[in-house]
Structure formats: C-alpha cells, structure tokens
Image (spheres, rainbow, N blue to C red):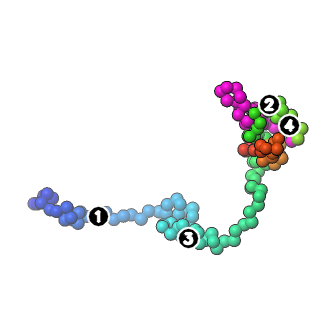
Amino acid sequence: MSSGLDKSLDDMIKAKPRPQRRRRALPAKAAVLGANNVGAGAAVKAAARAAALPTPAKSSEPTVTQAQQEARKIVVSNLPLDVTEQQIKELFATTVGKTREAILAYNAKGQSKGIAHVTFFNKGDGYKAFKEYHNRLIDGSQSLSMLSAS
C-alpha cells in the first residue's frame, strides 16, 4: 500500500474524485427578474431592453404617493436664523391651515439651525404646504426647502 507522500501534487489532485455539483434552484434575483437576466450578459440585455422601450415623458412634478398627499408633518430647511417658532406657526396657519406645533432645531449654543418641524391638524395640509413653499425664495436670496412631507 502506497501512501500519498510519494506522489506528486498533480497526481494527488487528479486522483482525488471531484464531487458532482448539484444544480441549485434559481437564485432570488433570477426568480424576480426572470431566468434570462442571470449571468454576465444581464446588464447588456437590460440595456438593450431599455433602449427598445419608449421613454416616458418626464414631468417636473415628482410622483406623489397617497401617504404624501395626506401628510400632516413637514420638515422645513434653509430658514433664516432669526425666525421664531411663533412666526412659522403664523405663516403656515394663515396660508395653509391650522398648525398643531412648530419646532425649531437649535445647536449646542442655542442658535437656530434654520430647520423646523411643522405639524398640522388636518390631513393633507403638510402636502399643501410642500406644494406652496417648496423652493420658494425668502428675502430674495434664500430658497425655502421642504425636505419631506409625512
């Protein structure tokens, strides 16, 4: 009986039986995208498919979900640093709807960060405020940004 020590490494590798690879079920990506998209050519196939499809007309309005349309809260950024919570409440109460609260964010020194969280009483008022004031100029130089409506 000969031991494996007197054989070369190549002979030992060739003599060792290779286990048969079992074919697995399609990976999750293939199950979602279809079996055609699996492999190295997936990007090429996707690009060809995208080129064949007509591109929809892009509108300047972002798509809006039902939850966003029923929003009560907004985050307002890029506010002037001298604005108070009372001024924010009054602005939105007179132009959009009754506000429940307006909370300004402050840094460690007690200075305003120019960010406010505003909550409205009625559903949809957050979205109304977003539509009304998003990217609107304040004092002719700063633009008011609504980060989100939720």
Residue denoted by label 2: 84
Q: CA distance from mark 1 to mark 4?
A: 76 Å
Q: Are marks 3 and 1 in contact (CB under 8 Å)?
A: no
Q: CA distance from mark 4 to mark 3?
A: 53 Å
Direction bottom: furthest residue: 52
| Label 1 packing within 10 angstroms: few (<14), some (14-19), many (20+) | few
- Residue 123: where, in percent of width, then height? 81, 42
Residue denoted by label 4: 91
- In what element is the residue under mark 4? helix
Q: Are marks 4 and 3 in contact (CB under 8 Å)?
A: no
- Residue 81: where, in percent of width, then height? 75, 33
Lower sequence index among marks 1 and 4: 1
- In what element is the residue under mark 3? helix
Residue stretch in magenta:
96-120
Q: Is residue 124 at all visible to an observer of this figure?
A: no
> Magenta stretch containing residue 110, yes or no?
yes
**Occupied quadrant, residue 2:** bottom left
Closer mark to the observer between disc 1 and disc 4: 4
| Label 4 packing within 10 angstroms: few (<14), some (14-19), many (20+) | few
Residue located 15% across and 59% down the image: 4
- In what element is the residue under mark 2? loop
Residue denoted by label 1: 18
Q: Is residue 87 at all visible to an observer of this figure?
A: yes
Lower sequence index among marks 3 and 1: 1
Disc 2 marks which amino acid? Thr
Where the C terminus falls, by quadrant?
top right
Disc 4 marks which amino acid? Leu
Tell me which secondary structure the magenta stretch mostly adopts: strand
